Amino acid sequence: MSAVEAAARALVGTRFRLHGRDPAHGLDCVGLVAAATGRGAPTGYGWRSGDARRVAALLDAAFARGGDAPGAVLLLRAGPEQLHLAIRVSDGIVHADAGLRRVVWRPGAPPWPVLGYWKGEG
């Protein structure tokens, strides 16, 4: 198991908090990726703007492009104007679920279109 996958799995159950960057106080999807990968969370992004190019450029600045492998960071289109991040794990994804109000493991393929993959490690 990759270090990023293990870190993401360890965060399952953490409280959801919009703009949350500290697992002790809650995480959103950006905070989850930052905590699982050990990298700083980007600022000045527009997740709800639907601007996938801008968000992909922020991810490109922090991570190398990669494939669909455990430990990968996934950029997802969660709604018409909403982007979302998740961590690929060997049997699904880990993501910060606003509706369930916590970080969760979801088995199988992501329920939203994947716009890109980045290597969470290295």
Image (spheres, rainbow, N blue to C red):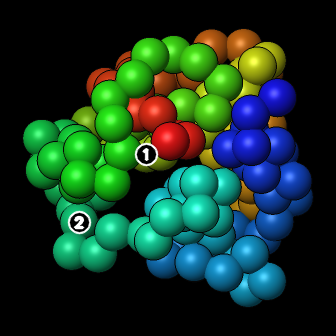
Position of the N terminus by quadrant: top right
Along the horizontal axis of the image, is 110 left or right of 54?
Answer: right
- The residue sitting at 50% across, 64% down in the picture is 39
Marker disc for residue 84: 1
Taking the view exactly as shown, the residue that stands out farthest to the front is: 122
Taking the view exactly as shown, the residue that stands out farthest to the bottom is: 25
Along the horizontal axis of the image, is 105 left or right of 37?
Answer: right
Q: Is residue 55 visible?
A: no
Residue 120 x, y percent position in the rendering: 52, 41
Residue 21 x, y percent position in the rendering: 57, 78
Along the horizontal axis of the image, is 20 left or right of 89?
Answer: left
- The residue sitting at 68% across, 44% down in the picture is 4
* Crowd around label 1: few <14 · some 14–19 · many ≥20 (10 Å): many
Residue 104 x, y percent position in the rendering: 78, 46
Residue 71 x, y percent position in the rendering: 63, 33
* Crowd around label 2: few <14 · some 14–19 · many ≥20 (10 Å): few
Residue at image mark 2: 45
| Amino acid tagged 2 | Tyr
Q: Is residue 10 above or below residue 122?
A: below
Which is nearer the eye, 3 or 12? 3
Count of numbered circles in the view:
2
Which circle's residue, 1 or 2, is located before the other in the chain? 2
- The residue sitting at 32% across, 29% down in the picture is 65
Which secondary structure lies at badge 2? loop
Which secondary structure lies at badge 1? strand
Q: Is residue 20 above or below residue 59?
A: below
| Amino acid tagged 1 | His
Q: Is residue 108 above or below residue 42?
A: above
